[in-house]
Amino acid sequence: MARPHCDGMGFALVNGRWIASPWCQAELAAQATRKGGWGYTAAQLRNNPKAIEEFCRGNADIRFTDTCAPHRD
């Protein structure tokens, strides 16, 4: 499977348009976890519910509003 071209803000270029992409959101979140000291990979965030829940808990960064919506109260 080909990786989408991500813009660094969680969007992928698809057919000439930028759309929100779960793949790109996970890549962006993985970068944030490395800076925050957790060190999750994008694959862990996509495939491990506990990892994404930990990342989203208390994370107020607006870049992850869509990604973290299912994991917030």
Image (cartoon, rainbow, N blue to C red):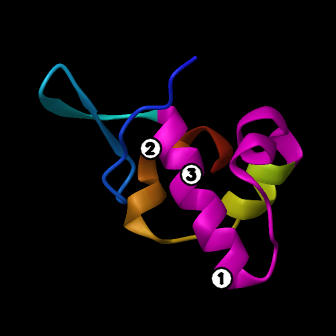
From the viewer's perspective, is 13 left or right of 46? left
Magenta stretch: give its range.
22-50
* Position of residue 70 measured from the top left corner of the image (x, y, whole percent): 60, 38
The residue closer to the viewer here, 5 or 45, is: 5
First-in-chain label (3 vs 2):
3
Please state which amino acid type lies under the numbered disc 2: Asp
- Secondary element under disc 2, as helix, strand or loop, is helix
Q: Main secondary structure of the magenta part?
A: helix
Name the residue carrying label 3: 27
Seen at 37% across and 59% down, the residue is 8
- Mark 1 element type: helix
Observer-nearest of 49 and 38: 38
SS of the residue at dot 3?
A: helix
Does the stretch in magenta take in 35? Answer: yes
Give the residue number, with chain letter if any, for mark 1. Answer: 35
Residue drawn 41% across the image and 34% down it: 21
Measured in 3D between alpha carbons, the distance from the residue under mark 1 to the one under mark 2, in whole angstroms, is 20 Å
* Residue 7 visible, this angle: yes
Residue 45 point in image, percent of width and height: 74, 46
Residue annotated with mark 2: 66
Residue 72, magenta (yes or no) = no
Asked whether 26 or 66 is in front, the reply is 26
Q: Nearer the viewer, mark 3 or mark 2?
A: 3
User: Please, what is the three-letter code of the amino acid marked with disc 1?
Assistant: Lys
- Quadrant of residue 5 in the image? top left
Q: Earlier in the sequence, mark 1 or mark 3?
A: 3
Percent position (x, y) of residue 29?
Answer: 59, 59
Q: Residue at x 79, y 82 (%)?
A: 37
Left/right placement of residue 48 relative to residue 19 reads right
Q: Which residue is located at x 52 percent, y 58 percent?
A: 28
In which quadrant will I find the N terminus?
Answer: top right
